[in-house]
Image: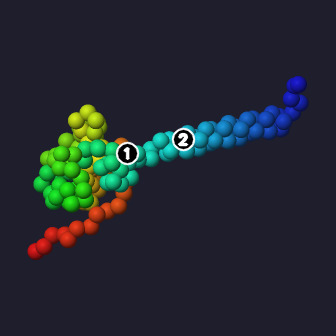
Amino acid sequence: QRLAGNLSRLVIVVWVFVVLILTTSYTASLTSMLTVQQLQPSVTDIQTLIRNGDYIGYRNSSFVGQLLRRLGVPASKIRPYTKPEDFLEAFSKGSRHGGVAAIFDEIPYNRMFLGQHGDEYTTVGPTYKTGGLAF
């Protein structure tokens, strides 16, 4: 049918734009929900890592290696790393191919690492408190 007046044409154009905006918003919302579900970590605590026989990394110059052994991680499953770039390589290899499934480190170093790579990695599980540093 032919539209009779300019007002009718204006109403149709506005209606089409509203439908396009609603469709786009729905699609973006659905995509976001599906993506967030996929980003959930597969490991949530140290017991899961031990049970799966996964390798765990830590920064070599810290006390974290001793803490991991006290938490029950076999020494053969603990891998020391010297710099954050090594963490990236270890994560990309994965535990089954010469890398690690998780890295334990002190909170300030974790925050620094996540500041640079937070879109790829996250922190999970409990925070293990220690006696701290003595002066």
Please state which of residues 39 and 32 is positioned toward the viewer in this rendering. Answer: 39
Which residue: 83% across, 38% down? 7
The type of colouring in the image is rainbow
Q: Which of marks 1 and 2 is in front?
A: 2
Q: Where is residue 72 in the image (x, y as percent from the top left)?
A: 24, 56
| Quadrant holding the N terminus | top right
Please state which of residues 73 and 135 is positioned toward the viewer in this rendering. Answer: 73
Q: Position of residue 115 (x, y in %)?
A: 31, 51
Which residue: 49% across, 45% down? 36
Q: Distance between the residues labelled 1 and 2?
A: 16 Å
Is disc 1 placed on a helix, strand or loop?
Answer: loop
Amino acid type of the residue tagged 1 in the rendering:
Asp
- For mark 1, what is the residue? 119
Give the crowd class for mark 1: few <14, some 14-19, many >=20 residues within 10 Å.
few
Amino acid type of the residue tagged 2 in the rendering:
Leu
Is disc 2 placed on a helix, strand or loop?
Answer: helix
Residue reaching furthest to the top: 1
**Residue 76 visible in image:** yes
Which residue: 18% across, 45% down? 76
In the depicted structure, whether residue 93 falls above or below residue 107:
above
Residue 34 image label: 2
Q: Position of residue 5 (x, y in %)?
A: 87, 33
Residue 132 image label: none
Give the crowd class for mark 2: few <14, some 14-19, many >=20 residues within 10 Å.
few
Please state which of residues 127 and 13 is positioned toward the viewer in this rendering. Answer: 127
Count the labels in the image.
2
Contact between labelled residues 2 and 1, with CB atoms less than 8 Å apart = no
Residue reaching furthest to the left: 135
